[in-house]
Amino acid sequence: MRKIKKRTFEELVLENKKELMKDEDFLNRLEERLEEKLIEKLS
């Protein structure tokens, strides 16, 4: 088995930020789609 490299706190924080940014992008796209569907239903 390979030994897992111990990461520094800074590395973990950076990795976390990247994940959050990806998630935020995804949520923004999802929100836009939902708004479009709602607008279509209302019109």
Image (cartoon, rainbow, N blue to C red):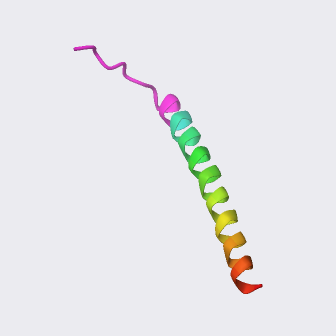
The residue sitting at 56% across, 34% down in the picture is: 14
Q: Position of residue 12 (x, y in %)?
A: 48, 33
Q: Quadrant of the C terminus?
A: bottom right
The residue sitting at 45% across, 26% down in the picture is: 8
User: Does residue 7 lie above or below 15 as drawn?
Assistant: above
Q: Is residue 22 magenta?
A: no
Q: Quadrant of the N terminus?
A: top left
Q: Is residue 43 left or right of residue 14?
A: right
Q: Is residue 9 left or right of residue 34?
A: left
The residue sitting at 70% across, 64% down in the picture is: 32
Extreme residue toward the top, this view: 2
Extreme residue toward the right, this view: 43
Q: Position of residue 24 (x, y in %)?
A: 61, 53
The residue sitting at 52% across, 31% down in the picture is: 10
Is residue 16 or residue 42 the one in the foreground? 42
Residue numbers of the magenta segment: 1-12
Count how many numbered circles sit on residues in the image: 0
